Structure formats: structure tokens, C-alpha cells
Image (cartoon, rainbow, N blue to C red):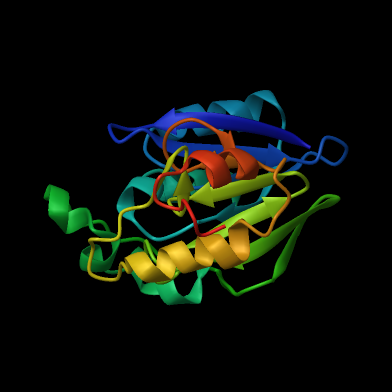
Amino acid sequence: MEIRKLSLGQMGTNCYILWDENSLEAAVIDPGFEDSRILEIIENNKLKVKYILLTHGHFDHLGGLNQVKAATGAKVLIHKNDADCLIEPKRNLSVLVGMTFKLEPADGLLSESETIHVGKLNIRVIHTPGHSKGGVCFLVEDTLIAGDTLFNTSIGRTDFADGDLSELLGNIQTKIFVLNDNIKVLPGHGENTTIGYEKKHNPFLQGRS
């Protein structure tokens, strides 16, 4: 498995491009703004992008979605509870920064424990609402792509309309912290971490693991 990380846009949203090295089938996760940088990696590595996977429906994770989909023909997948974020600016929060961000509906809806196949890679969906109703993490091999669920020594914001601090902390404890301590965590913003490190050092979760 190959993974490339890009920090995109003014909010430094992390986009991940992962692919199976044999088949070159790929998935783009959270294509934020600066879509040209995403497409450059796809072109340079001759990737066949099968899916665009969204950890949740906030606008900073969607900024390059239309362009990447148009260039690759990939199917867009989002959790069913965030599906309306693609078409509703209030739900994707773009109205908070003076934008009206509207996209086409998703091609498919994700659900808990679903497995997405990209070449020989098996990507498992873990539903972790709390930052948004349809927030998910993607587990593939020894790597968790966590979106805005879990950060390096922090967690996603829960002060938006569909946020819930107790729910987010509970999901991290029962669905994420049960994973192997050595699993790498690739967050939606900021630096990478591991499950074990967050159990020991994340101030929001001390005493809950």
C-alpha cells in the first residue's frame, strides 16, 4: 500500500491518496481545495482512482471534489448521515465563511463496518459521529484515516449544530481505542500520531481508555 498526504487550503485540511501498488487502483480521501495538487499525484503515478471517500461532509474536506471526480470518473462515497452536506450549504458549514457550497449527490452511501475494495486493499468503515452525524474513519492495514474524529493530542470540534462531545469521546473510546496501539492515525488536520500515543497523551481522553 502507498499513501500520500497533502495539506490543502487555508485550513490545512489533510487529503490522502492511497493505492494498491500492483493494480494502481486508488482512492482519494477528503479532496480539499487545491485539487491540482491531487491530480498531479494521480497523473504522475498513473493511478486509476476508483473512489473518492469522504470522512465527513464539511466544506474544507470537499473543496476539490467536483474537479477530482470530473478528471477521474471516481465514485463519491459518504456516510448516509452526512449525505445532505453535499447539497446543503448550511450542513457543510460553507455559509460560515460566506460561501454557498453545493455539489452533486454522492454515488453511494457508507455504513458501519462496510468494506471498500481498492485493488487488494480492504478499507473498513468505522462510524464515529460526534464531530458530524456522519463522521467516519477508514481502517486499512495498519493505518487509520481519522478525518476530524481524532487529532494528534486533540479531537474534532463539537460546537457545530450536529456536534456532540459525549458522543465523539464515547466513539473514540469504544471504536478507536480498541484498535492496536501501533496503528498509525492520519488525521484530517495536523500531524500523524498512533493509537497508543493518543491513549497516553490526548488530554481529552485521559482516563477513558
Residue 143 vertical position relative to residue 209 in the rendered view, above or below: above
Where does the image place residue 48, in percent across and percent down from the top left?
A: 71, 43
Pick the front one: 72 or 10: 10
Pick the front one: 113 or 108: 113
Residue, far front: 207
Pick the front one: 40 or 208: 208
Q: Is residue 159 left or right of residue 145?
A: left
Pick the front one: 166 or 86: 166
Which quadrant does the N terminus fall into? top right
- Residue 106 visible here: no
Q: Is residue 206 left or right of residue 112?
A: left
Where does the image place residue 147, in percent across and percent down from the top left?
A: 48, 50
Q: Is residue 28 left or right of residue 84?
A: right
Residue depicted at x 27% and y 69%: 88
Which quadrant does the C terminus fall into? bottom right
Where does the image place residue 38, in percent across and percent down from the top left?
A: 52, 33
Residue depicted at x 47% and y 37%: 152
Residue 113 vertical position relative to residue 63 in the rendered view, above or below: below
Residue 76 vertical position relative to residue 48 in the rendered view, above or below: below
Residue, far left: 98
Q: Is residue 147 left or right of residue 131?
A: right
Q: How many marks?
A: 0
- Residue 33 visible here: yes
Where does the image place residue 183, in percent across and percent down from the top left?
A: 70, 43
Residue depicted at x 71% and y 27%: 45
